[in-house]
Image (cartoon, rainbow, N blue to C red):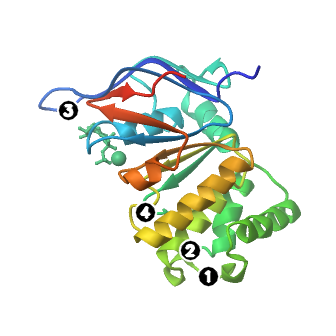
């Protein structure tokens, strides 16, 4: 059996602040198995984004262990962590974070270039990805020339550019109307069906209801759904 895609063991994340430390995630353990589609819900400030950043190796825990593909990565340095992220993890954000000066295609090519993929392969993979997210006709548009739903599709294509095992999304429908948001969730369902493990943070119960597993967070802990 393959190891879990990611596993947090007793993870705490504390932010030192002048008024005293803020504990955003406290002694949290969770396992995300290969092939899962998981949502994370909970009130504002309960630590959802902090947890997602830790699972995605963007941030490191103050204490506890993080295993990616069975390997402890909590002690990796910045460069090693970046390399791991580039090859194994895709991130989608509420506000898309596309680079405004680049076209849709160039945004999708960028992480491939960083990973050393040849120009020819980048081109063909990018057009396949834009086709996959239904945006072949927007290849040369810049982000300001795209609708919110289109921009999020480009961001999803970019997140998939290096064939990650794990796709993480933080409120990916937060800027979109209900119908467009549901289409974006449909796209995540397809990504999941095509073999990628997906974790989505959401405030929207209608989205959480569409995932086979829901984690409920409160005050830095998972209240429900941590183990499987
Ligand atoms: N860089 C930081 N420095 C200091 N405190 C932080 C930092 N990031 C998060 N926090 C604090 O940690 C707690 C959890 O924040 P987090 O962003 O993870 O919440 P969230 O569940 O994603 O909330 P929301 O639903 O509003 O996005 C909050 O109290 C927040 O103020
Ligand atoms: Mg958040």
Asked whether the viewer can see residue 99, the reply is no
Residue at screen point 69% across, 21% down: 3
Return the residue nearer the eye: 116 or 174.
174
Q: How crowded is mark 4: few (under 14 residues within 10 Å), some or many (20 or more)?
A: some
x and y percentages locating residue 96 in the rendered image: 49, 63
Q: Does the residue tagged 3 have its C-beta within 8 Å of any atom of ligand 1?
A: yes
Asked if labels 4 and 2 touch by Cβ distance under 8 angstroms, the answer is: no
Q: Quadrant of the C terminus?
A: top right
**Residue assigned mark 1:** 141
In the figure, is residue 26 to the left or right of 149? left
Residue 93: give its label: none
Q: How crowded is mark 1: few (under 14 residues within 10 Å), some or many (20 or more)?
A: some
57 w.r.t. 97: above or below: above
Residue at screen point 42% across, 55% down: 206
x and y percentages locating residue 197 in the rendered image: 64, 40
Asked if labels 1 and 3 touch by Cβ distance under 8 angstroms, the answer is: no
| 2 or 3: tag closer to the N-terminus | 3
- The residue sitting at the right extreme is 120
| 2 or 1: tag closer to the N-terminus | 1
| 3 or 1: tag closer to the N-terminus | 3
Residue at screen point 62% across, 82% down: 141
């Amino acid at each position: 059996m393959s190891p879990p895609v990611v596993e947090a063991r007793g993870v705490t994340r504390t932010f030192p602040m002048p008024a005293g430390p803020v504990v955003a995630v406290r002694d949290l353990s969770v396992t995300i198995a290969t092939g899962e589609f998981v949502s994370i819900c909970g009130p504002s400030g309960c630590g959802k984004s902090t947890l997602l950043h830790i699972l995605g190796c963007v941030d490191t825990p103050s204490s506890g262990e993080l295993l990616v593909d069975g390997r402890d990565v909590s002690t990796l340095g910045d460069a090693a962590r970046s390399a791991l992220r580039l090859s194994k993890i895709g991130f989608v954000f509420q506000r898309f974070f596309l680079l405004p000066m680049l076209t849709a295609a160039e945004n999708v090519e960028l992480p491939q270039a960083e990973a050393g993929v040849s120009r020819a392969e980048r081109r063909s993979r990018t057009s396949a990805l834009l086709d996959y997210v239904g945006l072949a006709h927007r290849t040369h548009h810049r982000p300001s020339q795209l609708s919110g739903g289109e921009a999020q599709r480009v961001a999803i294509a970019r997140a998939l550019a290096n064939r990650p095992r794990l796709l993480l999304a933080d409120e990916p429908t937060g800027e979109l109307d209900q119908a467009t948001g549901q289409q974006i969730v449909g796209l995540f369902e397809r990504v999941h069906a095509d073999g990628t493990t997906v974790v989505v943070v959401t405030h929207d119960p209608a989205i959480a209801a569409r995932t086979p597993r829901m984690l409920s967070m409160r005050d830095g802990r998972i209240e429900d759904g941590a183990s499987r």
